[in-house]
């Protein structure tokens, strides 16, 4: 890497990470002392694998809806354009273990889901592009590696 970029993940060497993992990207503090914690939830090995869009999209809907049943303070969970992971933003909670447990519970919800929430043209921008089975496949593989999520880099 030569020049330091504005975006944290553009300074991350994606050839040195080992997915899956959950990584704290950074902390932003507001003027009143509130803190926003941003996490990189990496499901797939960068430049080797990726999530297919219909499964990724359904996983987004399922996680966005269900994570809020397990934890307050969730600002946003959204997919990366490279289709290898999601960003999760949380405020005023820096408990890594609690956040990882919450992600685990949320992915268990995905496995138990009977339908994708808000999967219609009123509530979604591309309602035809969904796959519940695809989402479950991604969640299942991620959960199978639960013990390795804390390790971000190749040793
Ligand atoms: Zn949608």
Image: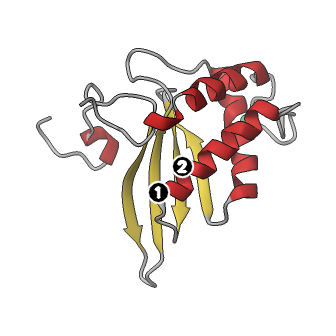
96 lies left or right of 133: left
Measuring 46% from the left and 27% from the top, which residue is drawn there? 82
Nearer to us in this view, 108 or 38: 108
Can residue 9 be spotted in the picture?
A: yes
Q: Is residue 41 above or below residue 140?
A: below
Image region (quadrant) for ligand 1: top right
Q: Which disc, if any, is residue 76?
A: none
> Residue 103 location, x and y as percent?
60, 46
Can residue 61 be spotted in the picture?
A: no
> Residue 73 location, x and y as percent?
62, 66
101 lies left or right of 5: right
- For label 1, being within 8 Å of ligand 1 is answered no
Q: What is the secondary structure assignment of the residue under circle 1?
A: helix
Nearer to us in this view, 138 or 80: 138
Q: Which residue lies furthest to the bottom in this view?
A: 32
59 lies left or right of 91: right
Q: Quick one: label 2, few (<14), some, or many (20+) residues within 10 Å?
A: some
Residue linked to disc 1: 96
Q: Which disc, if any, is residue 100?
A: 2
Q: In this view, does 155 lie above or below 62?
A: above
Spatial CA span between label 1 and label 2: 6 Å
Quadrant housing the N terminus: top left
68 lies left or right of 21: right
Measuring 43% from the left and 76% from the top, which residue is drawn there? 30
Q: In this view, does 80 lie above or below 130?
A: below
Number of numbered labels in the structure image = 2
Kindly indicate whether the residue at mark 2 contacts the one at mark 1 (C-beta within 8 angstroms). yes
Measuring 83% from the left and 34% from the top, which residue is drawn there? 113
Measuring 74% from the left and 22% from the top, which residue is drawn there? 129
> Residue 139 location, x and y as percent?
64, 29
Q: Quick one: label 1, few (<14), some, or many (20+) residues within 10 Å?
A: some
Quadrant housing the C terminus: top left
């Amino acid at each position: 890497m030569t020049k330091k970029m504005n975006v944290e993940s553009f300074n991350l060497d994606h050839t040195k990470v080992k997915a899956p993992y959950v990584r704290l990207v950074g902390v932003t503090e507001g003027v009143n002392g509130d803190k926003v914690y941003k996490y990189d939830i990496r499901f797939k090995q960068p430049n080797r694998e990726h999530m297919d869009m219909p499964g990724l999209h359904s996983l987004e809907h399922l996680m966005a809806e269900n994570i809020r049943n397990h934890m307050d303070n969730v600002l946003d969970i959204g997919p990366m354009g490279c289709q290898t992971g999601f960003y999760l933003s949380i405020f005023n909670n820096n408990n890594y273990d609690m956040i990882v447990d919450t992600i685990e519970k949320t992915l268990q919800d995905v496995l138990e889901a009977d339908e994708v929430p808000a999967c219609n043209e009123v509530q979604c921008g591309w309602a035809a592009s969904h796959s519940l089975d695809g989402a479950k496949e991604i969640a299942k593989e991620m959960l199978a590696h639960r013990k390795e999520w804390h390790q971000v880099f190749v040793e």
